[in-house]
Image (cartoon, grey):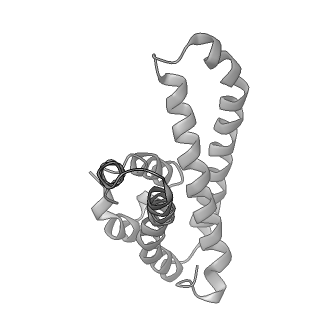
Amino acid sequence: MALAPEHLRSAVELICVAIAENTVTGDVAAFARDDTVKPSIKGLMADHLLDEGRHSSFWARMVRIYWHTANDADRETIAQILPVFIGHYLTNDIQKSFDLRLIDALPVSDAIRRSLRDEMAGLAFPINRHHPLVGNIVRFFHSSSLLDTSCVQHALRDYLV
């Protein structure tokens, strides 16, 4: 948000919230497509999935409406902010810090502590197009029409296949 000029802060906030809403929606939808999930659990999740789908459509429409009214200069400015936001949004630094403090506090041997740290390090994903949540974010950029704009395509080139 701090990178956005005052007149664009609400627009950037709208887009950032929409990204977050659609990232979660994509994961919930993936859950519904997972054949390893028992049908009874999928049934319990049906209402939630329907609600998430409505959220996804709502946020994509809101951003699309805004984007089509934004001028070229504002679009360019927002496009430059998007990769910075994605990097901050997908970082696991807070979780990693908590996990390391927790591991240090555990009453275990140094060998187990090292093993836990190694396992934790293996769970980290680089923030690039291979990150498991980037696909959801890119799908949102398509559905909201942001990726129809060359400045967004250029700004997000490292996340696109």
Q: How many marks?
A: 0
In percent of the image, x 52 and y 18: which residue is there? 37
Q: Residue 106 appears at what percent x and percent y?
A: 48, 54
Residue 5 occupies which quadrant of the picture? Answer: bottom right
Q: Position of residue 73 (x, y in %)?
A: 49, 83
Is residue 55 visible to the viewer in this orientation of the structure? yes
Task: Specify whether residue 124 is in view.
Answer: no
Judging depth in this view, the residue of 108 and 144 nearest the camera is 108
64 versus 79 height, above or below: above
Q: Quadrant of the N terminus?
A: bottom right
At a point 42% along the width and 58% down the height, the residue shown is 147
Residue located at (53% from left, 48% from top): 23
38 vs 49, nearest the viewer: 38
Asked if residue 117 lies left or right of residue 55, the reply is left
Quarter-of-image position of residue 9: bottom right
Q: x, y (%) of residue 33?
A: 49, 23
Which residue is the extreme one toward the top? 39
In the rendered view, tell whether residue 48 sits above or below residue 56: above
Horizontally, residue 46 falls left or right of residue 119, namely right
Q: Identify the residue at the far bottom of this view.
A: 6
**Residue 117 horizontal/vertical position (percent):** 34, 55
- Left or right, 92 with respect to 130, comes to right
